[in-house]
Image (spheres, helix red, strand yellow):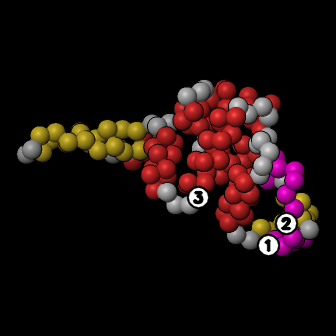
Amino acid sequence: MYHFTDGGLRNVWLANGYRIKNTPYGETVAIQNIDGLVAAIASALIRKKSTLGGTEFRYIRTAMLMSQAALGKALGRTEQAVAIWEKSGHIPKYADSLIRVLYALQANGDEKIKNIIHAINDSERTIQLIMKETPKGWSSKESSKGELHLTE
């Protein structure tokens, strides 16, 4: 069995789904279907009966591709508050419950939740507003910072 310590977890062991390879630089492990494994671990964590530890809370947050700032915003707290919870392991009950519900809904394909999480994550990204005059008036389009092509 392989002790899987991704994301700081210490209590996950893989019975299969991995290959150990010897390279000139030492032993390496290749995980098959890593996305499926991450989802299975996060799903197991949200079903556990005891409260989440800081590392488990962080694992679920990162499985949702949320930053500390984005989750803090969703919970009405600061990025620093989320960082402290994850480091100390003292997760408020409401945050523990909410992250479990958010992950469950997102993992089960709830489009509204996926869109909300996507919007929260996008709120951290710098965007450019592209304004275009049309016969019906001005319209706007959002663009990622790297997509903007200026002409004069």
Callout 2 amino acid:
Leu
Quarter containing the N terminus = bottom right
> Which residue appears at 34% of the width and 43% of the height?
142
Sequence-earlier tag: 3 or 2: 2
> Which residue appears at 46% of the width and 37% of the height?
123
Does 140 sit above or below residue 45? above
Crowd tier of the residue under label 1, counting other residues whose Cα lies within 10 Å: few below 14, some 14–19, many 20 or above: few
Residue at the disc numbered 2 = 14
* Spatial CA span between label 3 and label 1: 21 Å
- Which secondary structure lies at badge 2? strand
Callout 1 amino acid:
Gly
Crowd tier of the residue under label 3, counting other residues whose Cα lies within 10 Å: few below 14, some 14–19, many 20 or above: some
- Residue 143 position, x and y percent, is 36, 45
Tell me if residue 24 can be seen. no
Does 152 sit above or below residue 12? above
Q: Is residue 70 left or right of residue 47?
A: left
The reply to whether callout 1 and callout 2 are in contact (CB within 8 Å) is: yes
Residue at the disc numbered 1 = 17
Sequence-earlier tag: 3 or 1: 1
Numbered circle sitting on residue 74: none
Tell me if residue 139 can be seen. yes
- Which secondary structure lies at badge 3? helix
Please give the range of residues in magenta: 6-23
Quarter containing the C terminus = top left
**Number of on-image labels:** 3
Residue at the disc numbered 3 = 107
| Closer to viewer: mark 3 or mark 2 | 3
Crowd tier of the residue under label 2, counting other residues whose Cα lies within 10 Å: few below 14, some 14–19, many 20 or above: few
